[in-house]
Image (cartoon, grey):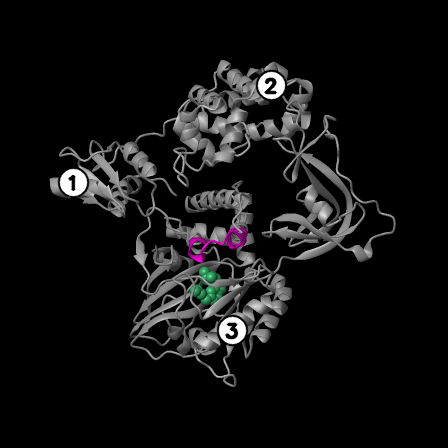
Amino acid sequence: MKTEKNQDELEALERTIARHERLYRAGRSEISDAEFDELLELYSAHADAAGLPPKRRLDMQIESDHTEGFETVAHRVPMLSLEKLSSSRRDAQGAPMALAEQLSLWYARRRKDLELSSGEPLALFVEPKIDGIGISLVYANGQLQRAVTRGDGRQGDDVTAQVMASGAVPIALVGISSGTLELRGELYWPHAAFSAYNARLEAEGARTIANARNGCAGLMKRKDPSALEGVGIESFLYQLAYSDGLDVPTKQLETLDWLASLGAQVYTQEARRVESAEEALDYCEAYAERRRELSFDIDGMVIKLNNLHYYPALSGTGHHPHWGIAYKFPPERKLTRLISIALSIGKSGKVTPVAHLEPVSLAGTMVSRASLHNFVELERKDIREGDQVYVEKAGEIIPQVVGAEISERPPGLPIYTRPEVCPSCSVPLVSEDIFIYCPAPSCPDQLRERLKHFASRRAMDIEGLGESLIDQMVEKLQIGSPDDLFLVTPAQLETLTRMGKKSSENLVRSIETAKSRGLARVLYALGLRHVGEAMAEELARFFSSASALLGFAERYCDGNDEAIGLVAPAKSGARGAIEGLARKSADSIFSELNSEAIRDVLRGLEDHGVLLSVVEPARKEVLGIAGKTFVLTGVLPNLKRDEAAMQIKLAGGKVSSSVSAKTSFVVAGTDAGTKLAKAEALGVTVLAESDLLALLDARNTQSDDDP
Ligand code: IVH
C-alpha cells in the first residue's frame, strides 16, 4: 500500500542515496560501499512496499566511477552487475523470502528460459565474490592494450598506465600471439600489502587508508602511475567477455584453468562446480565460515551457470545478466551480556537507548557499545538489562543489538521501562512518532551535542575544538549557545585543563576563521531537523541571506499563500521551487527557523561578525564559455538545469532564458521544445550536454590539482 509515510521515507532515502553517490563520485565518500549497499537495499524494501516499478529502483544503482582527467572508453560488451539474493526480499504477498527459496526460483527460471526438461542437468559454478574493483583488460596479439574501469557499465576510465605500473595483471599472455581478447576480473589489495602500505603512511605521519577496496580504487585513479609500483595490488580474472580469432573454452571451470595457463591469477582452488541450487547455497554458506581466514576481502559468492553456451540465450534486465546471481554473506553475530542500557541525547533532544556490553570481538574489533535503535524496537524485542544479547555490525561497521537470547535469561530480570524524564536536565520527556525527545533547549547534554555538531568539520570546521574542550566550556565558561563561542577570549581558555597560552590563542584564531564559512555551513551547523548539508546548501542558494530566509520563515508560518506556494505549488504532484523540500519537512524547518531560540542564535552570530550570506565559489574563466550567452532547454541527462547554469556562470558565461540572435549556444536535452526550434531557425549552435561538459572540462584539464 502506498502510504504518505512511505512516500516521505522514500523521498528522504532517495535524497540520501543521491547525496552519497555524489560524494562517492567526487572521491569524498562518507560511508563504506557496504553501507551504501545497505541503503540501496533499504530503498528496495521501501519501494516494494510502495509498489514502485522495478526500473526506478534499479536505475538508482548505476553509479559511475569516472574521474576528471581520465579518458572515457566505451566497453565493447557492457560491464553489468549481478542481481543479489537479498534477505530483505519479499514475495508477492509481502512475506519474507528465504535465500534458498530465492535461489531455487532463480534456478527454476533459468531452466525454463533454456527449455530444459526435468531430467536434464544444469550445472552451476560458485566462486568467491572479491571485494575489489572490476576491471576490463583488452589484449591484442597477446599484449595488454587497454585496462578500463567499470565506470557506469557502458563506459569506464582508461587506467592502462596505472594497471601496468601495478603489475597486477599479465602484460603479455603466455602462448597467445594473435587475435583479440577482452578479459575481466577484479583488482584487489591483499591484507598484508594493504597493511604494509598503511604502516608506511603512518611512519610518514600521513593519514592512513581505512578500507582496502576504496584504497585500491583511489590508487588506480592516481594521475602518476609510478604511485602504483610495488604497492602490492593483485588481481583475480574470472571472465572472458569477448574474443576474436581464438579458440576459447565453453565452460566456466575450463575458463579459469585456461586463464591460469595464460599467466593470470585465478581462484580455481576456491571455486566449485555444483549440480543444484541447494548445493550452491550450501557451498556459499560453508564459505562464510572460511572467509576470515583468507588473505584478501570477499563480500559474498557468485553463482553462475557453468555452460557459457547458455549465456547469449539468457538475456538480462539491462542492468543484470540472467546467467548469474550474487550471494552476500550474513554479518558476523556474537552473543554477549548486556550490562546496562544507557541513554544518549542528541542535538535535537532525541533520546536513544545505547547498549553497554561485556566486550566482545566482532568482525575484527572489540565491541562494548552498540545501538539499540529506539524504544519501540527495544520493547518489541523485549530486551532487558542483564540479558545475553546478539550483536552484529550493520554494513560491517556499526555495532547493533539484534535481539536477546530468552532461553539464557536469568530469572527475575525486570522488563525495561522507558525513561520519563530527561537524564540530563530532569525535564519530562515527550513522545513523537516512535521517538522520545527532551523538549528543553537549555538541556546541558543537548547543548553539548549542538556545540559539537556546530564545530564539526562539515559544519563550521573549528579546528582544535574537540569534545572535551566543549564539555569544559559549557561547565566552566558558561557557554550556552553556539554564538557564545565567538566571544571566548584566550585568557578564558587558559583557565581550562590542558590549555596553554599558545593553544588558547590558536583556538581563538580558528574560531575567527570559521566566521567566514558562509550561510550554507551556518544553516547546517545549527542542526535543524530535516536540514542536512544538501538542504542547507539549497536554502542558502535560494535565499542568499539569513535575513531573507528568516523573513520567508515568518511569512510561511503566518500562512502567507505566496510563501507556501513556493514550497507546495497548487498543481498537485508538482515540486516546489525549493529543490527537494517536501511540505512536511518545510513546516518543521520554517517553524524552527522562526522560533525565538534560533532567531536569537542567528542574531548573536551576526553581532559577532559571522557571515550570514552565501559565499560565492571562485570564478575561473573558461575559454569557449567566458563572455558567451547560453540558453538551456529540455531535460539534460546528468546535470540539473540550475547546476548547468551555475557551472556556466562560474566559467564566465551568461545564461539567458530566451533565444535570440545574440544567443551563442543553446544546450538542448530531451523534450526540448520551442527554444530548440527557434535556435535552429536563427542558426544558433545547438549543443548536447556532453558538448557543454567537454567545454567545461577544459577548465579541469588546465588545472594541476589532483582529484
Ligand atoms: S562475474 C555481470 N565473478 O562483483 C558481472 N563478478 O555484481 C558479473 N565480482 O561488479 C561478473 N568477484 O566486479 C563475477 N567471481 C566473480 C566476482 C565478480 C567479484 C564483482 C564484479 C561485479 C560484482 C557483481
Q: Amino acid at mark 3?
A: Tyr
Q: Nearer the viewer, mark 2 or mark 3?
A: 3
Instruction: Please name the residue shown 65% across and 17% down the image.
Output: 477
What is the count of numbered marks? 3
Instruction: Please name the residue shown 42% across and 72% down the image.
Output: 263
Q: Dividing the image into 4 quarters, which one contains the C terminus?
A: top left
Q: For the stretch drawn in magenta, what is the main secondary structure? A: helix
In the rendered image, the residue lying farthest to the bottom is 119
Instruction: Characterize the local packing of mark 2: few (<14), some (14-19) or many (20 or more) Cα atoms within 10 angstroms.
Output: few
The disc, 3 or 1, on the residue closer to the chain's N-terminal end is 3
Instruction: Characterize the local packing of mark 1: few (<14), some (14-19) or many (20 or more) Cα atoms within 10 angstroms.
Output: some
Q: Amino acid at mark 2?
A: Lys
Mark 2 → mark 3, Cα distance in angstroms: 71 Å
Inspect this view and state whether residue 567 appears. Answer: yes
Is there a contact, CB below 8 Å, between mark 3 and mark 1? no
Q: Which residues are magenta?
A: 42-57
Can residue 237 be found in the magenta stretch? Answer: no
**Image disc number at residue 501:** 2
Instruction: Characterize the local packing of mark 3: few (<14), some (14-19) or many (20 or more) Cα atoms within 10 angstroms.
Output: many
